[in-house]
């Protein structure tokens, strides 16, 4: 078990919290502040317990000079200030005198946000290569390090992994919740355990499939990913998305786990994603010009039957191109079935989480995991570097 923020005395301590403020921005305006909101419980806990809070986060990528202004964290400090209803100090520099003075003048219960950690990538990629000197420097600014940036836990950077080597460390509430929920559903011994996979490409999910297929009783495959599996079984797929390089993998997994894998039997097809001329076809009737964009009604029915006795479900990837109103039905119906029947369901993946918010009610799910890449790697069975570096409870 990892130490958490609750395992430390925070009174008058300089507590460095690595948060995930990598919010979407358009011309300096934050278009979605969910990530800021989700970091608040840990920040609040720290200030309520008398800490001097120092926040670190990355924002976007910094490769050239022009990326600096584009990925300036200052607007985030303003938004945080509004949300937390408390002054948030900001250091425009990631190191140096200005920053050090701001740190040393912090009083207990005050918050300082440091400029985008990836400003340190401009010369020598110091943040992203986990530069030792930088990690040590940031560690020298505080007494305790808390990692609450779940979305970057799969990366080994100076601000989340390097720094933890030089300070007593713990995880924040967000990371704690994510790992407890994911471990919880993976480790409980209830069956049938059904995994539903979808989304665009097989390639991105090979390791997840390899890991979960061993643990689950059934794997239902929809979305664009299904076509490479269907092609591997010699079904016609027309112009539907095919991931040629993963074909061998699909063949192999289909032959090893034949009885566990369920593929679509019908789908919604069209000549192009922009056309409104949509028809329902059985997979075996797919013509050369058809492109499949959603699972069909018979597949929805089949998947519901397979889910009827499920005790726990993990979903990764939508069943169709849900961004297009013509192709939302499959994803929506599956969510509805799971929530109506109170089936314990964990949803992982950035687009999957977005599809739940759009088509269903996120509160009705056991957990919606927000860390796209981090969650995928966790589901692959990988030990995330941002978590493994944290001190263990004694
Ligand atoms: P997640 O982010 O949840 O891991 P992915 O990124 O793997 O999910 O996949 C999401 C994308 O898959 C969506 O943008 C969706 O439009 C696309 N997708 C789903 N079904 C299809 C399909 N039949 N053909 C092409 N793309 C699809
Ligand atoms: Mg995605």
Image: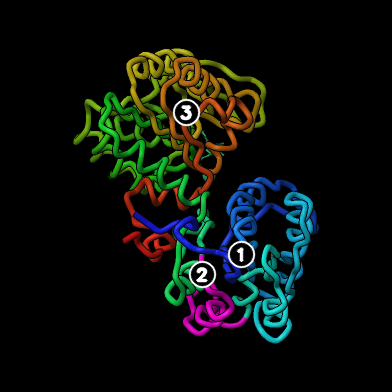
Q: Where does the image place residue 258, in percent across and percent down from the top left?
A: 22, 29
**Badge 3 density bin: few <14, some 14–19, many ≥20, Cα 10 Å:** few
Q: Nearer the viewer, mark 3 or mark 2?
A: 2
User: Real-space Cα distance between discs 1 and 2?
Assistant: 10 Å
The answer to whether residue 86 is visible is yes
Residue under label 2, please give it: 144
Q: How is the image coloured?
A: rainbow
Dot 3 corresponds to which residue? 288
Mark 3 or 2 closer to N-term? 2
Per the image, is 131 magenta? yes
Determine the image quadrant of residue 191. top left
**Label 1 SS:** loop
**Pointer 1: what residue?**
51
Q: Is residue 85 left or right of residue 13?
A: right
Q: Residue at x 42, y 40 (%)?
A: 181
- Looking at the rendered structure, the secondary structure element under dot 3 is loop
From the viewer's side, name the closer residue of 9 and 340.
Answer: 9
Dot 2: element: strand
- The alpha-carbon separation of the residues under discs 3 and 2 comes to 61 Å
**Residues in magenta?**
123-145
- Near mark 2 (Cα within 10 A), the count class, few <14, some 14-19 or many ≥20, is many
Q: Earlier in the sequence, mark 1 or mark 2?
A: 1
Report x, y in % for residue 129: 48, 75
Q: Are marks 1 and 3 in contact (CB under 8 Å)?
A: no
- Tell me the quarter of the image containing the C terminus: bottom left
CB atoms of marks 1 and 2 within 8 Å = yes
Seen at 49% across and 58% down, the residue is: 5
| Closer to the camera in the image, 358 or 387 | 387
Task: Judge whether 158 appears above or below 25 on screen.
Answer: below
Q: Position of residue 19 (x, y in %)?
A: 58, 59
């Amino acid at each position: 078990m990892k130490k958490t923020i609750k395992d430390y005395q925070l009174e008058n301590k300089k507590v460095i919290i690595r948060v995930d403020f990598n919010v979407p921005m358009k011309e300096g305006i934050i278009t979605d502040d969910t990530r800021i909101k989700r970091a608040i419980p840990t920040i609040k806990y720290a200030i309520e317990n008398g800490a001097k809070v120092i926040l670190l986060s990355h924002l976007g990528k910094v490769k050239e000079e022009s990326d600096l202004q584009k990925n300036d964290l200052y607007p985030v400090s303003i938004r945080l200030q509004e949300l937390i209803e408390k002054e948030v100090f900001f250091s425009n520099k990631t190191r140096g005198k200005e920053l050090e003075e701001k740190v040393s003048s912090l009083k207990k219960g005050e918050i300082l946000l440091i400029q985008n950690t990836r400003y340190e990538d401009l010369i020598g990629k110091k943040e992203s290569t986990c530069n030792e000197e930088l990690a040590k420097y940031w560690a020298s600014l505080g007494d305790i390090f808390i990692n609450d940036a779940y979305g970057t836990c799969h990366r080994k950077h100076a601000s989340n992994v390097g720094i933890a080597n030089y300070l007593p460390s713990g995880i924040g509430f967000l990371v704690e919740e994510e790992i407890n929920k994911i471990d919880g559903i993976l480790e409980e011994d209830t069956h049938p355990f059904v995994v539903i996979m979808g989304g665009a490409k097989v390639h991105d999910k090979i390791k997840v499939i390899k890991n979960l297929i061993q643990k689950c009783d059934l794997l239902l495959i929809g979305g664009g990913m299904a076509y490479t599996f269907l092609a591997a079984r010699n079904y016609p797929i027309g112009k539907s998305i095919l991931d040629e390089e993963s074909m061998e993998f699909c063949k192999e997994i289909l032959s090893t786990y034949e009885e566990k894998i369920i593929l679509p039997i019908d789908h919604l097809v069209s000549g192009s994603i922009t056309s409104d001329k949509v028809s329902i076809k059985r997979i075996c009737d797919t013509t050369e010009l058809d492109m499949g964009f959603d699972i069909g009604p018979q597949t929805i029915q089949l998947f519901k039957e397979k889910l009827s006795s499920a005790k726990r479900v993990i979903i990764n990837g939508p069943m169709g191109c849900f961004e297009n109103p013509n192709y939302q039905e499959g994803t929506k119906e599956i969510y509805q079935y799971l929530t109506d029947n109170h089936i314990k369901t964990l949803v992982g993946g950035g687009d999957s989480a977005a599809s739940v918010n759009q088509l269903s009610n996120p509160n009705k799910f056991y957990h919606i995991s927000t860390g796209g890449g981090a969650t995928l790697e966790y589901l692959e069975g990988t030990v995330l570097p941002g978590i493994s570096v944290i001190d263990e409870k004694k």
